[in-house]
Amino acid sequence: MSQPERAPQRTALAYELASDPHWVASGSTQQGGPLALPERRATRSTAGTPYNLTVYDLALELDNDLAEFTQKHGIDVELPTGRTAVADYAARLAERDGAARADYEELHLLHDLRAALTVGTGDSILGKLACPACKCWSLVGTRTPSGAWAAACRVVRCAPEPGTPRVHSLRAVVRYHFKPHRDANAA
């Protein structure tokens, strides 16, 4: 059978299916009689939250910190508006000045740690950073009583009291991590 002979058969089959009420697209016609279904309504009264608000809070916190960074290290021109423009401007400022670069790297690592700990992958990153007190690589993420992220050292000898791990703020861990680089740049 050649291609031109198939076309009339396909068209005839399509018309036959379209006339059959069983194959009519859902919602295209109203059926009456015993097959009629009541009109369906949504069961929820409110919509669900479309994204994780904790991650959104982290993004807002980063926006605020980048804005402070650009005000601190920026020149006296009008600061850009918008999340992407501010982040791009901050990166350009960090390329120009050594002190700004160090602050930018600290800010970047701090927010990367917060985001990783929030998502659940922070212990692998914290394990690569040294404890500011005992200088070993034994940090794990923990929460402070206020709910902020912190880093606790697992070494027993580092604990201030037996059974109480030494806890450092993430900012202190990041500053300690970049301290050798700052000292080398200052010399």
Image (cartoon, rainbow, N blue to C red):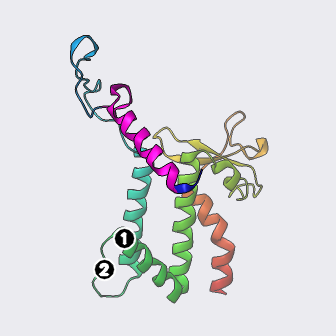
x and y, in percent, of residue 120 in the image: 60, 44
Looking at the rendered structure, the kind of residue marked 2 is: Leu
Q: Is residue 161 magenta?
A: no
Q: Is residue 9 above or below residue 129?
A: above
Question: Hey, which quadrant is residue 31 in on the image?
Answer: top left
What residue lies at 47% left-to-right and 41% top-to-bottom? 147
79 horizontally vs 10: left or right: left
Residue range of the region highlighted in magenta in the rendering: 4-26
Q: Which residue is mark 1?
A: 67
Q: Do callouts 1 and 2 mark residues in contact (Cβ within 8 Å)?
A: yes
Q: Residue at x 47, y 83 (%)?
A: 92
Residue type at mark 1: give it. Answer: Ala
Question: Which residue is the site of mark 2?
Answer: 79
Between 164 and 131, the residue placed more toward the observer is: 131
Task: Tell me if residue 20 comes above or below residue 69 in the rendering.
Answer: above
Could you say where residue 153 lies in the image, as x and y percent from the top left? 70, 47
